[in-house]
Amino acid sequence: MRESVRQAVSFIHRNYTEPITLSDISSEVFVSPFHFSRLFAQDIGISPGRYLGAVRMFEAKRLLVESSMNICDIVHSVGYSSVGTFTSRFTRLVGMSPREYRKPQVGRLMVAASKDFTRMPRPVELAGLHASAPRTTAPGTGCVRGLIEFPRPVPDGQVLVGVYAADVPQGRPVAYRVLPTAERMPFAVDGTPPGEWSLVALAVRNGTVTGGEAMIGSLPRRVTVRRDTNTWTRLSMRRMKATDVPLAVTLAPAPAAARASLACG
C-alpha cells in the first residue's frame, strides 16, 4: 500500500468527527484530489468519500448501541452537520432509522469488526438465530456453498458468513450463517435470492471487545446465485488491518417499512 494512502486513512480516522472534504484529505498527503482518489481506490477498493462515510456509519452505530448520547449529539459527533441528511442516509443504507437502531435486540444481535472494536452476539442469542435459519434451499432461491480457511493460530470465536447487496455491508445480510471458527470450515448459506451479491465473512470473539482482533474474508468479485442451484466458492480469512473498512451489521430483522424519523432522543 502506498504511504500516501496509509497516511490518508490515518487522517480520516483522526478527523472523521469534523466536516472534512476530499480536498482536505488530499491536501494532507500533498496530492491533487483527482490523482489521490484514483490511488486511494486502487489500494483500498473504494473511494475516499465512501471510506469516510463507512467510518462515520460504523462509529454512529457503535454509539447508538453502546452510549446514552441522544441521536442529535451522535450525528454531530461523527461529522454530520445536518440531522436530516444523516438520518436519511442511515435509513437508506442500514434499512432502519437511527431511533430503531437503538432497540435492545439490534445491539444484542450486532456483529462488528474493526481493528479496535469487535462485537459478536452471545452463544444463547446465536442459538436462537440458528433455530430459525433455513436448513434447506427454499424453492426459487439458491445456496452459496464453499470452504473457509483460517491462518494459524485459528481464533476462538464465531464467523458470520453473509450475503449482501452492497460492496460495503451496512444493513442486515440478505442471507447468512453463523458458525464456530475452525481451520477449514465448510459452509452453506441457504435461501439466497437469485442475483449478484457480495460475500463477506467476519470472525470475532463472542461479546464486546475493545482492541479485540477481528478477521475478514471476501471475494474480489460478486457471486452469481441462480435459483435452485448451488454456487461454490472459497474464502481465505486474514487479520483485519488498520486500513480496512470497519464493518458493523445487525442480524435483527429490519422493520417492515423503515422511516427516517428526525427525532433526537
Image (cartoon, rainbow, N blue to C red):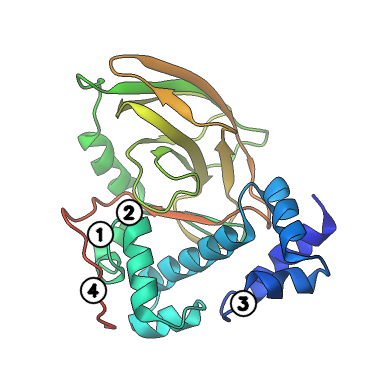
The local crowd at label 3, few if under 14, some if 14 to 19, many if 20 or more residues have their Cα within 10 Å, is: some
| x and y percentages locating residue 87 in the rendered image | 34, 71
Q: Which residue is mark 2?
A: 109
Describe residue 247's horizontal placement relative to residue 73 as left or right: right
At x 78%, y 65%, the residue is 32
The secondary element bearing badge 1 is classed as helix
Q: Which residue is mark 4?
A: 261
The secondary element bearing badge 3 is classed as loop
- Residue 68 visible? The answer is no
Disc 1 to disc 3, C-alpha distance: 33 Å
Count of numbered marks: 4
Describe residue 123's horizontal placement relative to residue 49 as left or right: left
Q: Earlier in the sequence, mark 2 or mark 3?
A: 3
Q: Which residue is mark 1?
A: 105
At x 61%, y 51%, the residue is 46
Q: Earlier in the sequence, mark 1 or mark 3?
A: 3
Q: Earlier in the sequence, mark 4 or mark 1?
A: 1
The local crowd at label 1, few if under 14, some if 14 to 19, many if 20 or more residues have their Cα within 10 Å, is: some
Disc 4 to disc 1, C-alpha distance: 19 Å
The secondary element bearing badge 2 is classed as loop
Task: Between residue 52 and residue 237, name the one nearer to us.
Answer: 52
Describe residue 139's horizontal placement relative to residue 213 as left or right: left
Q: Are marks 2 and 1 in contact (CB under 8 Å)?
A: yes
Circle 4: residue type? Ser
Q: Earlier in the sequence, mark 2 or mark 4?
A: 2
Circle 2: residue type? Leu
